[in-house]
Image (cartoon, rainbow, N blue to C red):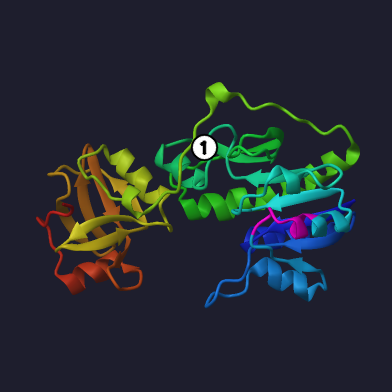
């Protein structure tokens, strides 16, 4: 088939590379977001140019010129591999078989742009990915295929995405393309009664409330590691907390109950968090033990507002 690959960053680039390596389809164009001044060239653009593929970067998909350009490609399918810009029906439906889109959750659960963050924050033990036929709703189109992923008790946003969902998503992209090529691919309507939606997981959502159950605190830290980073207050400044583990301790919520060679322990409701790595304000990530030594953090200090 003649394919348009639309995407960005590492996932888009690896999806494009996998399609090229498989060799079954012709890439007629690669679409990605416009360049941003002062930012590195997108990985998918860089790789596509290295492969001699045409790269197109429209600011939107509403202009007649942009739509005519897509029509001229005579594509059979558009594969949307990590797309954050809105692509309307007028553009999506131009290829013979329309467009399919990647989403890192088991739709209809966790629609929205921070689906992995919120799944972890909510303590889920199973998530996955979906390729679906997008419509003008947010992640609401019919499902083409899904793959499940087990969420480990210590998975973070980083490990869950890069070690599990990302590689499985590349395999699923190739399978999804094969399903479309074979004819009569699945179009399974999403169960709206099971649908959830969450917006971006931002800094203001990542503040630690040490009075919450220790498991909820732990899930917040791992669900925001590495972005946007869970945080608390120390001496009036934001202190971001990344790598950590749960321990059995008692103490006032937010109290530093012990400083060790491997970090410091903060009491929560029903247990404690052993913090291994932090990022002080206007600084890089450092070992928690190093931070404690430099800042004078000691047992009895109360973190938080």
Q: Residue at x 67, y 38 (%)?
A: 135
Against 260, is 186 above or below?
above
Q: Residue at x 18, y 61 (%)?
A: 234
Position in image of residue 166 (x %, y %): 62, 52
Q: Is residue 248 left or right of residue 168?
A: left
Residue 56 occupies quadrant = bottom right
Furthest-bottom residue in view?
38
Residue 103 occupies quadrant = top right
Q: Is residue 10 left or right of residue 70?
A: left
Of 6 and 86, which appears nearest the observer? 86
- Residue 64 in the magenta stretch? The answer is yes
- Answer whether residue 115 is visible to the viewer in this image: yes
- Answer whether residue 149 is visible to the viewer in this image: no
Mark 1 falls on what kind of element? loop
Against 295, is 146 above or below?
above
Position in image of residue 19 (x %, y %): 81, 57
Position in image of residue 24 (x %, y %): 90, 54
Q: Which residues are magenta?
A: 60-67
Q: Residue at x 52, y 78 (%)?
A: 38
Of 231 and 247, which appears nearest the observer? 231
Of 124 and 4, which appears nearest the observer? 4
Position in image of residue 140 (x %, y %): 62, 34
Residue 120 occupies quadrant = top left
- Mark 1 closeness class: few <14, some 14–19, many ≥20 residues within 10 Å: many
| Residue marked by disc 1 | 110
Q: Residue at x 43, y 47 (%)?
A: 154
- Residue 241 in the magenta stretch? The answer is no
Q: Is residue 271 left or right of residue 9?
A: left
């Amino acid at each position: 088939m003649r394919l348009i690959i639309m995407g960005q960053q590492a996932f888009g680039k690896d999806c494009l590379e996998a399609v090229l390596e498989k060799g079954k389809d012709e890439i007629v164009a690669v679409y990605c977001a416009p360049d941003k001044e002062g930012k590195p060239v997108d990985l998918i653009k860089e790789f596509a140019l290295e492969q001699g593929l045409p790269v197109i970067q429209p600011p939107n998909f509403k202009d007649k010129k942009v739509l005519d350009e897509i029509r001229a490609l005579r594509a059979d399918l558009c594969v949307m591999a990590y797309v954050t810009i809105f692509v309307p029906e007028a553009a999506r439906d131009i290829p013979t078989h329309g467009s399919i889109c990647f989403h890192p959750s088991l739709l209809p659960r966790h629609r929205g742009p921070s689906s992995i963050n919120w799944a972890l924050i909510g303590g889920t033990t199973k998530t996955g990915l979906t390729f679906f036929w997008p419509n003008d709703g947010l992640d609401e189109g019919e499902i083409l295929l899904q793959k499940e992923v087990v969420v480990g008790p210590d998975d973070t946003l980083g490990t869950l995405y890069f070690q599990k969902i990302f590689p499985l998503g590349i395999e699923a992209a190739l399978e999804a393309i094969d399903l479309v090529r074979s004819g009569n691919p699945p179009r399974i309507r999403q169960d709206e009664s099971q649908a959830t939606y969450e917006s971006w997981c931002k800094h203001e959502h990542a503040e630690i409330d040490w009075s919450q159950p220790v498991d909820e605190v732990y899930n917040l830290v791992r669900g925001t590691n590495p972005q946007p980073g869970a945080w608390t207050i120390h001496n009036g400044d934001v202190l971001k907390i990344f790598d950590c583990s749960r321990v059995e301790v008692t103490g006032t919520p937010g109290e530093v109950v012990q400083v060790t060679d491997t970090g410091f322990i903060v009491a929560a409701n029903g247990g404690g968090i052993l913090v291994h790595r932090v990022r002080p304000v206007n600084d890089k990530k450092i070992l928690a033990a190093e931070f404690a030594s430099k800042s004078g953090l000691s047992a009895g200090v109360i973190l938080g507002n």
